[in-house]
Image: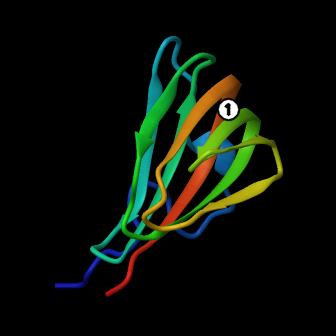
Amino acid sequence: MEQVLIKNIPFSQALVMKDLVEYKEGTVISRTIAQRKDLSVTLFAFDKGEGISSHSASGDALVYIMDGTAEITIGEEKVLAKAGEVVVMPANIPHALDAVERFKMFLVVIKPQ
């Protein structure tokens, strides 16, 4: 049996990444693209005012903002990230995300093996 590494998106075609996840009023939508114990790749769409509360992860997290604006809190620092920008949230440092306006992000988390 062949192992599937990437899931939930069509193969062998050009796709617009930010169109792979849609906004929904009053909620956060996610689409998992890959999930292993040492790696996760997920697309998110946040409605304005939504967010993810402060938490820590055992791996480094890279966030690429595809659309809109997010306020990302890392430890005691706040970063305003807009479409086209990337932010790295280091492992084991509390971080949170809040939608200043609707935003979509591509999240890659890499954990130690």
Give the residue type at disc 1. Answer: Phe
Instruction: Count up the numbered dots.
Output: 1
Q: Position of residue 87 (x, y in %)?
A: 70, 57
Of the 4 image quadrants, the one containing the C terminus is: bottom left
Residue 60, relative to residue 48: is it above or below? below
Residue 8, relative to residue 13: is it above or below? above
* Residue placed furthest toward the top: 25
Of the 4 image quadrants, the one containing the N terminus is: bottom left
Dot 1 alpha-carbon crowd within 10 angstroms: few under 14, some 14 to 19, many 20 or more: many
Q: Residue at x 36, y 75 (%)?
A: 5
Residue 2, relative to residue 73: is it above or below? below
Q: Position of residue 32 (x, y in %)?
A: 40, 53
Q: Residue at x 37, y 83 (%)?
A: 112
Q: Position of residue 101 (x, y in %)?
A: 72, 22
Residue under numbered circle 1: 103
Query: Is residue 47 found left or right of 52 in the rendered image?
Result: right
Q: Quadrant of residue 46?
A: top right
* Residue placed furthest toward the front: 76
**Who is closer to the viewer here, 39 or 14?**
39
**Who is closer to the viewer here, 89 or 68?**
89
- Work out whether residue 16 can be spotted: no
Q: Position of residue 74 (x, y in %)?
A: 59, 50
State the colouring used for the structure image: rainbow
Residue 112, relative to residue 79: is it above or below? below
Query: Is residue 28 found left or right of 23 in the rendered image?
Result: left
- Work out whether residue 104 can be spotted: yes
Q: Residue at x 66, y 51 (%)?
A: 17
Is disc 1 placed on a helix, strand or loop?
A: strand
